[in-house]
Amino acid sequence: MSDYRYDWGQGNNMRRPGIFLCTLLLVLLSTFAGNVGQSGEPKNRYPNELSEYRFYETAPWRSLTPLVSTMKDIRQILGDPQEAKDVSAYLKPYPGDVKALEPVFTYKLSSGWTLLVYFTKYCFHEFPKGLRGDRLCSFDLVPKKRISFDTSRLPDTFHKNHIQAADAAWDEYSDGTGLRYEVYTTHPPYGSEKPGDLFRISYGPPIAVVENN
């Protein structure tokens, strides 16, 4: 199965909010971006990571904030991606960050994972309307090999949502912080993955930021 997801229209219907909503949004995002400890290092935005999948605390992208950081910020911190694609014109050369309608950055990590970076132009997390399309949506870690995922180890803070896509189906387990574990419920047409295997881990914006707008 392709690492690039089909778009079900989540979060892409943008309009300009009123002055009050703009002010509230800025306050919320500033609070989210300023979530730092006394040492100046960001606090753990995703405290419910499972112990065997605890990547955020040491991730090179830890200082980048969903809905706040920009495409330029991503390139400054992580460097240029090994691959950049505009999913809306997948077979064509990448037209650049400004012209890309559905951009996805790919970083091939050496630890058995591929990092996909999504932006608000093409986002599978909910987010407030009115944001610029170049803002970070999520970091998604996709395993390079099959990983059987034991959902019984997830605490009660996680809630399940079933997703049926054109080429596969999976369950999303989210805890409200923006952390999501996605687990196949069908055998995708490409690759060796089976039901119960981990599809990806997604680190996006917290639900509280969305619900208050």
Image (spheres, helix red, strand yellow):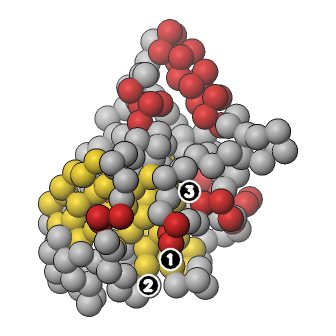
Of the residues under marks 3 and 1, which one precedes in the sequence? 3
Which is more toward the observer, 128 or 193?
A: 193
Do the residues under discs 3 and 1 have CB atoms within 8 angstroms?
Answer: no
Residue position marked by numbered label 3 in the rendering = 97
Give percent across and percent down for residue 128.
42, 31
From the image, state whether disc 3 or disc 1 is nearer to you.
Answer: 1
The type of residue carrying mark 1 is: Thr
Residue type highlighted by circle 3: Asp
Q: CA distance from mark 3 to mark 1?
A: 20 Å
| Residue farthest toward the right in the current orientation of the protein | 39
Left or right: 159 as drawn, with respect to 86: left
Q: Is residue 50 above or below residue 42?
A: below
The residue that disc 1 covers is: 114
Asked if the residue at tag 1 contacts the one at tag 2, i.e. Cβ–Cβ closer than 8 Å, the answer is yes
The residue indicated by pointer 2 is 144
* Other residues around mark 1 within 10 Å, as few (<14) / some (14–19) / many (≥20): some
Q: Which residue is at a point 61% across and 85% down the rendered structure image?
A: 110
Residue name at image x 29 percent, y 77 percent: 197
Q: Secondary structure at mark 2?
A: loop
- Badge 2: how crowded within 10 Å, few (<14), some, or many (20+)? few
For the question of whether residue 163 can be seen, the reply is: yes
Residue 101 visible in the snapshot: no
Q: Nearer the viewer, mark 2 or mark 3?
A: 2
Whole-number angstrom distance, CA of label 2 to CA of label 3? 26 Å
Q: Residue at x 66, y 69 (%)?
A: 80
Tag 2: residue type?
A: Lys
The residue nearer to you, when weighing 78 against 201, is 201
- Closer-to-camera residue (175/204): 175
Image location of residue 118, percent across then percent down? 47, 57
Q: Is residue 197 above or below residue 36?
A: below
Give how far apart the Cα atoms at labels 2 and 1 are: 7 Å
Q: Are marks 2 and 3 in contact (CB under 8 Å)?
A: no
